[in-house]
Image: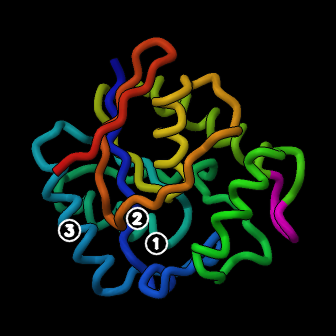
Amino acid sequence: MAVIYHVEHGDTEYDAQDKAQGLIDSGLNDAGRRQARASAQLLKGRGIECIYSSPMLRARQTAEIIAKIIGAKVIVRKHLEPLDIGTLTGKKNTTVKPYLEFFSSRPTLAFPKGEKFGEWYDGARKEWIHQFADDDPVIAVVSHTRDWQLLKHWQRNGLDAGPEGIEFVEPGSGQVSKATKQGNAISVRQVG
């Protein structure tokens, strides 16, 4: 059974203002660095040798802080990149949420000047299937809110579910969740 610890990247200035970042490549603020160190403490002693990270600076910085503390290596994976929400980037999360619900239920439509939710979903799903098939028995993945939301969606509906019905609840910055897969079933629970 594969075990993955999903870590939500630490806070940036956008998070501090409750704004959606999309593909803005912002780095961690002081609170985000503290959150990354706290996440590392939760991951210590769990046998993690490899941390997969989104290519975005906020995720890479979180992964690097954790890796330094727990003695792991970081591998950047392009398909852990966040959803391109186009012109909604930089808007309040409360403004973005109805658009996420709309486009996830119409996956062939693109966000204004962004990508099609369905194409992003398919790529993210393939990446997570790849992660669950990893040779390492225990790994960590540092990425974004949408990934945690997908894990929760798959926990309710199975890994072969389409994007319809995703609940766009926000996890806490730096939150660590343990995800396990057995067959098509995913189990997700918060750590710490």
Where is mark 2, residue-wise? 9
Q: Which residues are magenta?
A: 111-116
Q: Nearer the viewer, residue 75 or 35?
A: 35
Q: Are marks 1 and 2 in contact (CB under 8 Å)?
A: yes
- Quarter of the rendering occupied by the N terminus: top left
Q: Are marks 1 and 3 in contact (CB under 8 Å)?
A: no
Left or right of 114 on screen, residue 171: left
Q: Is 153 covered by the magenta stretch?
A: no
Q: Secondary structure at mark 2?
A: loop
> Residue 177 in the image: x percent, y percent?
31, 45
Left or right of 113 on screen, residue 188: left
Mark 1, Cα crowd under 10 Å, few <14 / some 14-19 / many 20+, is many
Left or right of 186 on screen, residue 48: left
User: In the drawing, what numbered circle is on residue 58?
Assistant: 1
Where is mark 3, residue-wise? 37
What is the residue that sits farthest to the top in this orientation? Answer: 183
> Residue 147 in the image: x percent, y percent?
52, 49
Q: Amino acid at mark 3?
A: Arg
Residue displayed at 77% across by 45% down? 105
Q: Secondary structure at mark 1?
A: helix
Residue displayed at 64% across by 83% down? 90
